[in-house]
Amino acid sequence: MFSKSLIAIDFGSSAIKLVEFADPKAQKLKNAGLETLPANSIVDGVISDADEVTNCVSELMDRLKISKFGRRAGISVGGNAVMMKKVYIPEGMAGGELIELVSSEAEQNFHADLRELYWEYLVLNEVPDSQGEVPVLLTGVSKDVVDGYIEAVRNVGLRVGVVDCDVFCVMNSYEHNYGFQDKIKIFLNIGAKISQMSIVNAGEYLYSRDINFGGDDYTAAIKENLDLSFENAETMKISASQIGGEQNPEIVNIISEVNNQLSGHISNSIADFLQMDNNFGGEMDSIVLSGGSSKVLGLDAAIAAELQIPASIMNPFAGVDLKKSNASMDYLLEQGHLFGVASGLALRKFNEK
């Protein structure tokens, strides 16, 4: 009944993005599209208007001509709703002893009753450090939050086959399209309200942090400085950032100032990581941008200047066969940066951990 590929749905605060592969093994793209959400339908990663979210998913699937019968969806959770913590435990632990220890660590680090969370642990590296310990990643999300997404998907007529986190989806997309070399990379997925930063060493998760700063901060700055409506300010931001778009000097200066603010937040987050992780002993190779605001005018250059490392915008379809895609090449070239989470999610397998 569920022989078809996964329908990957990325629930953002301003839009819902969807990716579907025709053949998940061969990674042949079939569909990619988005639908704008009414304001405040999803706030801080939590659904606040279930009807609007369900309608948005349904309308998007109808527009892309995707059948809802007998299909499974993958969903991803991000923002402040997700709790992530890396801890270290003695090597060689297994079975009930391991479960008991990581459960205790999760309860202490999440400051929550584990019965109220969906949570998982993953041993990141079997090789012990100098203290004879191995790193374990703990991830937890409130059951109420996840159940809200599951209900929205079920109301469309779909079943949920995979639940993931935005940070890991972006990493998965990058690994498929570019591959992880023996280098330390920073990933920054920039949404409307929150930017998710993560640090990865040769594909191994090291650290992540949500920065409460995103595309809406650019729009708000333009609105305040030029006394515009939010909608008009958003239009001017987008126009200035497009190739060949109108670049009003005032808008350019405002965007440049906000670029510097975001770059500063990233630099501070990296400094916090370096201060807290005594086991880290490498140099950052580059930073990879994704998300709706990754193409803001001059942002990549500003971040590169602040961090003194190369910055690039990820193409989540760089290693994907696009020949039979229902999305046009022009659309993917212009809007592809929006699908970092959805593309990585679409590559997941059912029941994959």
Image (cartoon, rainbow, N blue to C red):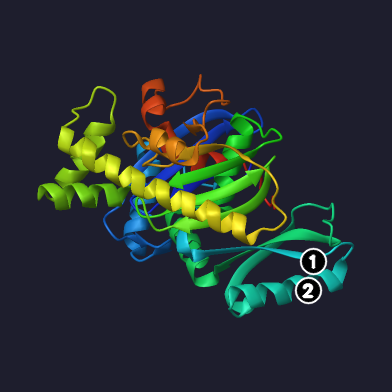
Residue 61, position as x, y percentages in the image: 40, 42
Residue 248, position as x, y percentages in the image: 16, 32
Q: Amino acid at mark 2?
A: Leu
Q: Amino acid at mark 1?
A: Ile
In the image, 154 versus 131, the foreground residue is 131
Instruction: Name the residue rendered at 19%, 46% in the picture.
Output: 222
Residue 316, position as x, y percentages in the image: 51, 33
Which of the numbered marks, if any, corresponds to residue 101? 2
Q: Is residue 29 left or right of residue 274?
A: left
Is the residue under label 1 in contact with that under label 2 (CB below 8 Å)?
A: yes
Let me know if residue 336 appears in the view: yes
**With respect to residue 246, does 133 lie above or below?**
below
Q: Nearer the viewer, mark 2 or mark 1?
A: 1
Instruction: Name the residue rendered at 32%, 47% in the picture.
Output: 215
Classify mark 2: helix, strand or loop. helix
Residue 48 lies in quadrant? bottom left
Q: Is residue 202 left or right of residue 53?
A: right
Q: Which residue is mark 1?
A: 89
